[in-house]
Amino acid sequence: MSETAAKEGPAREAEKEETGPGHIRQRNRTLILTAAEEIFAEQGYRGATTAAIAERAGLPKANVHYYFGTKEALYRAVLDDILTLWLGELDRLTEDSDPADALADYIRAKIVHSRERPLASRVYANEMIRGAKHTRDFLKQDLKSLVKTKSRVLESWVAQGKMEPVDPVHLFSIIWAATQHYADFEVQVSALVGRRQMTAKDYDEAAETIVRMVLRGCGLNYGKG
């Protein structure tokens, strides 16, 4: 819980005057989304309650319903936040990009998200394991469309002789599986490397291993950036 969420009386009023209602609203939404991501990752959609999320956020339960309405609406907002974060990284892949640099940067960015937002990956993994009830339309429409667009980028690289032919859908699937593994199975990897918790160096080494394997599989030169 943040200190600002716990302020009372005159201190709270002073804060309102200094920051304004827009800032307070954004701060509260962020607190709720962060808490919800944690609770959904820990307890799943069925086990999570708005009361538990409110308590984790340090806000009244009424605030959760005020900003998001229902638990389902909040869950969808959490998923939207996660997908916006992840899919925005695909902007790195353009026809004018150097394939090796673009793919390497994309993989490294995905590993950073696995290190900094592991619970986000677990929320999404649980959603997929349970049949994507809340994201089925997104997968069939928005995600499919985006992957088709980025697949054309990879195909243009192949056509220009910049890389070897590769199935774009399977390449993206491999990258997602490899990078998100370090969020979903962090405990297992930590055990294998002999640590209670992975270090920044471990994540960096994982990223470079994935980069090297993907680039060489695409017929691209690997040069650590």
Image: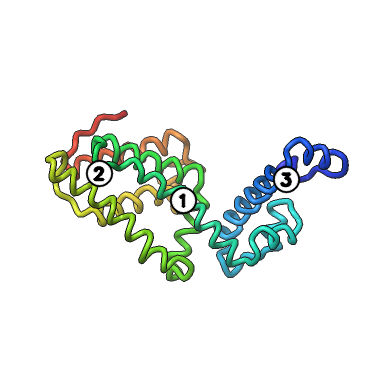
* Residues at circles 3 and 1 in contact by the CB criterion of under 8 Å: no
Q: x%, y% of residue 34?
A: 60, 50
Q: Is residue 77 above or below residue 4?
A: below
| Residue 17 showing in the rendered view | yes
The answer to whether residue 213 is left or right of residue 129 is left
Question: Which residue of the protein is positioned furthest toward the right in this rendering?
Answer: 10
Q: CA distance from mark 3 to mark 2?
A: 47 Å
* Residues at circles 3 and 2 in contact by the CB criterion of under 8 Å: no
**Residue drawn 73% across the image and 38% down it:** 19
**Residue drawn 47% across the image and 59% down it:** 124
Question: In the rendered structure, which amino acid carries the disc numbered 3?
Answer: Pro
Q: CA distance from mark 1 to mark 2?
A: 24 Å
| Residue 1 showing in the rendered view | no
Disc 2 marks which residue? 214
Question: In the rendered structure, which amino acid carries the disc numbered 2?
Answer: Val
Q: x%, y% of residue 169?
A: 26, 56
Question: In the rendered structure, which amino acid carries the disc numbered 1?
Answer: Thr
Tell me, for residue 21, which label it has, or none: 3
Disc 1 marks which residue? 84
Tell me which numbered mark, 3 or 2, is placed earlier along the sequence.
3
Tell me which numbered mark, 1 or 2, is placed earlier along the sequence.
1
Q: CA distance from mark 3 to mark 1?
A: 25 Å
SS label for mark 2: helix
User: Which one is in front, 181 or 163?
Assistant: 163
